[in-house]
Image (spheres, rainbow, N blue to C red):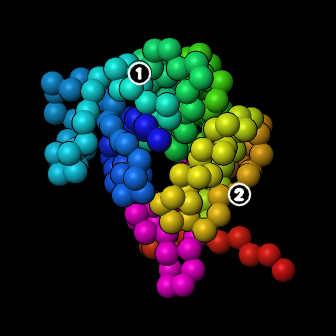
């Protein structure tokens, strides 16, 4: 797949490296390529091409947004024409939401012409995206959204980087619920001081 990642911090960087290792073509979308940006060292180390966001979007079929959730609507307004492209929202507004929105995915849908928007890669930390294996067990990932096309792609990408399964959390009406699931990880990892090397696995009897 041709993937653009917008936001090259810990999560965006981990996904960029993981997708590249899985054989996908990855480029970074940045506000201004002429200005130093977070993740430029990563871009240089791994030779990731980087372009202004609208140009990067044009070059890819899948757009992964891994920026602070409160600017989701601002990023969506810079994307240009994204009709037919899949947008994967990795953000969580549990601490700071986009103004006037319940979650980041709603903000994206309301500020660009995308219809294939799903939320995925938001329920665990960057460390687990770089390595989801705990001994012989691989963690699971989760996805929410109405777009069947978007879910199929997100599920495949999750497995490509080593997650055991990617479970369907529901439609657009579950965007907030999956953010709250992410808050459970944040609570345990940081607020309860269990550390970031923890993750979720769905067990079935």
Counting labels gives 2
Q: Which residue occupies 50% across, 80% down? A: 134
Q: Which residue occupies 43% across, 37% down? A: 2
Q: Which residue occupies 55% across, 27% down? A: 85
Front residue of 150/191: it is 150
Relative vertical location of residue 168 with respect to residue 185 in this rendering, above or below: above
Question: Comparing marks 2 and 1, which lies closer to the viewer?
Answer: 1
Q: Position of residue 105 (x, y in %)?
A: 61, 33
Q: Is 152 included in the stretch rendered in magenta?
A: no
Q: Residues within 10 Å of mark 1 (few under 14, many from 20)?
A: some
* Circle 2: element type: strand
Q: Position of residue 64 (x, y in %)?
A: 47, 38
Q: Which residue occupies 71% across, 70% down? A: 202
Q: Position of residue 91 (x, y in %)?
A: 52, 42
Q: Residues within 10 Å of mark 2 (few under 14, many from 20)?
A: some
- Residue 69 in view of the camera: no
What range of the chain is rendered magenta?
A: 120-139
Residue 58 tag number: 1
Q: What is the distance, in whole Å, between disc 2 and disc 1 at their CAs? A: 29 Å
- Residue 114 in view of the camera: yes
Residue 167 tag number: 2
């Amino acid at each position: 797949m041709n993937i653009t990642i917008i936001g090259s911090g810990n999560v965006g960087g981990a996904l960029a490296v993981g997708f590249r290792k899985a054989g996908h073509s990855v480029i970074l979308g940045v506000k201004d390529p002429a200005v130093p940006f977070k993740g430029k060292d990563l871009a240089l180390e791994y030779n990731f091409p980087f372009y202004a966001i609208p140009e990067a979007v044009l070059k890819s079929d899948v757009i992964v947004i891994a920026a602070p959730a409160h600017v989701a609507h601002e990023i969506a307004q810079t994307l240009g024409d994204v009709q037919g492209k899949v947008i994967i929202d990795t953000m969580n507004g549990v601490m700071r939401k986009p103004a006037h929105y319940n979650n980041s995915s709603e903000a994206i849908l309301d500020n660009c012409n995308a219809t294939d928007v799903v939320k995925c890669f938001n329920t665990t930390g960057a460390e687990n995206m770089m390595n989801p294996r705990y001994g012989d067990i691989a963690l699971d990932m989760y996805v929410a959204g109405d777009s069947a096309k978007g879910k199929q792609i997100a599920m495949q990408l999750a497995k490509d980087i080593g997650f055991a399964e990617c479970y369907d959390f529901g439609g657009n009406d579950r965007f907030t619920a999956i953010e709250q699931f992410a808050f459970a990880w944040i609570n345990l990892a940081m607020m309860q001081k269990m550390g970031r090397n923890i993750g979720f696995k769905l067990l079935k009897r």
